[in-house]
């Protein structure tokens, strides 16, 4: 199925110009219209159904050409330019170092599903050398350079990324449990990035918006694939169980200061790096609502991910364990 993204993209301009807000800022209705499209069941299904094809014929999603030279500060709408730039710096630091992320995930995935391990982490030789990066890495590694280009176009300055320390793979007796915990945080990160780029896209126009649109498409693509894979691999999981696992992960890491793998650590780091303290009340409110409504649309989509649908797509689920086993 082909999704007509440019049409909706144009619709955003229409909605913005028709916005009743005197500042020209996107209204909650503008944001809901974007969510209705990008987080629609049709779009999420389309991205998930693409996964088996990418297992066999991995191919990067091509970006629409962007007029980088035309990116300018007056394309920011409804966010203070200084705040927008601090969000950009935060996103640059969060996107790096992608190689570290992909190789950790590959190690957790390998015992459970080699196809997915290859999709995220590529092919590794017997000596541990990476022979071919995974598709996830190939698509994600375009993000930091794109954001750097946007930043230097807007400010005339170069920013040096300060990549985060990646929490290394930790072998556990039960690889099913290990992947479950690791995977939850990966899905959460893709979801957070998708919400952020959608919200930023609503606050921009022209070529600046076009860059954020490409980033959004990549993050939603990965989020849908990871989410669907997770539901397929852990059919007995439930929302309360997911919440409980995240809570346990948090409690288990009390000894670590701001551990990157705990959910609280992730959220704290995200608000820190995005300079949340400097955001206007309106920006905070609309971003929070965007995240909230995005989650609502994801749980609606989740109801369509029946075991039969997922088995048809990805084959027999590898985990037949009950909730108590992981
Ligand atoms: Fe990314
Ligand atoms: Fe991502």
Image: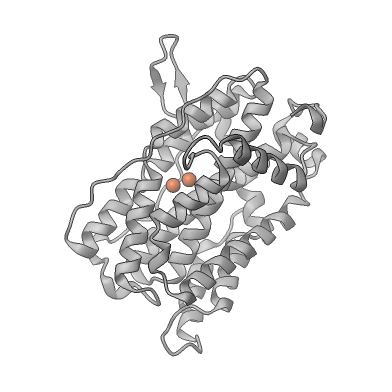
- In the figure, is residue 207 to the left or right of 140? left
25 and 207: which is toward the camera: 25
Q: How many marks?
A: 0
> Looking at the rendering, which quadrant does residue 86 occupy?
bottom left
Q: Residue at x 45, y 40 (%)?
A: 60
- In the figure, is residue 239 to the left or right of 246? right
Q: Does residue 40 lie above or below 125 as drawn?
A: below
278 and 286: which is toward the camera: 278
Residue 272: give x, y in percent of width and height.
41, 55
> Looking at the rendering, which quadrant does residue 165 occupy?
top left
Residue 91: give x, y in percent of width and height.
38, 53
- In the figure, is residue 200 to the left or right of 27? left
54 and 277: which is toward the camera: 277
The residue at the far top in this view is 126
Q: Residue at x 72, y 43 (%)?
A: 244
Q: Does residue 277 lie above or below 179 as drawn?
A: below
Q: Does residue 18 lie above or below 65 as drawn?
A: below
The residue at the far front in this view is 255
235 and 322: which is toward the camera: 322
Q: Residue at x 67, y 55 (%)?
A: 298
The residue at the far left in this view is 156
**Is residue 50 in view from this perspective?**
no
Residue 252: give x, y in percent of width and height.
61, 34
**Is residue 184 in view from this perspective?**
yes
The quarter of the picture where the C terminus appears is: top right
Residue 230: give x, y in percent of width and height.
67, 38
- In the figure, is residue 19 to the left or right of 47? left
């Amino acid at each position: 199925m082909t999704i007509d993204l440019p049409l909706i993209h144009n619709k955003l301009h229409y909605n913005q110009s028709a916005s009743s807000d005197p500042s020209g800022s996107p209204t909650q209705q503008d944001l809901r219209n974007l969510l209705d499209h990008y987080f629609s069941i049709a779009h999420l299904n389309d991205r998930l159904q693409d996964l088996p094809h990418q297992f066999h014929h991995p191919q990067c999603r091509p970006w629409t050409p962007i007029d980088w030279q035309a990116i300018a500060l007056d394309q920011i709408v409804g966010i203070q330019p200084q705040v927008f730039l601090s969000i950009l710096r935060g996103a640059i630091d969060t996107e790096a170092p992608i190689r570290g992320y992909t190789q950790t995930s590959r190690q957790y995935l390998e015992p459970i599903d080699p196809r997915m391990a290859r999709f995220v982490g590529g092919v590794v030789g017997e000596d541990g050398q990476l022979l071919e990066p995974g598709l996830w890495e190939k698509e994600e590694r375009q993000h930091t350079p794109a954001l750097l280009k946007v930043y230097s176009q807007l400010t005339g300055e170069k920013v040096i990324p300060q990549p985060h320390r990646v929490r290394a793979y930790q072998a556990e007796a039960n690889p099913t449990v290990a992947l479950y915990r690791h995977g939850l945080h990966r899905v959460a990160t893709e979801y957070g990035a998708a919400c952020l780029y959608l919200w930023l896209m609503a606050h921009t126009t022209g070529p600046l918006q076009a860059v954020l649109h490409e980033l959004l498409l990549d993050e939603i693509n990965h989020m849908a694939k990871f989410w669907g894979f997770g539901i397929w691999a852990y059919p007995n999981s439930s929302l309360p169980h997911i919440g409980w696992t995240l809570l346990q992960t948090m409690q288990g890491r009390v000894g670590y200061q701001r551990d990157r793998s705990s959910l609280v650590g992730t959220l704290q780091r995200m608000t820190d790096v995005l300079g949340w303290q400097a955001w206007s009340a309106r920006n905070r409110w609309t971003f929070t609502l965007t995240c909230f409504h995005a989650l609502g649309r994801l749980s609606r989509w989740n109801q369509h991910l029946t075991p039969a649908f997922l088995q048809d797509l990805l084959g027999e689920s590898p985990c037949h364990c009950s909730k108590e086993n992981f």
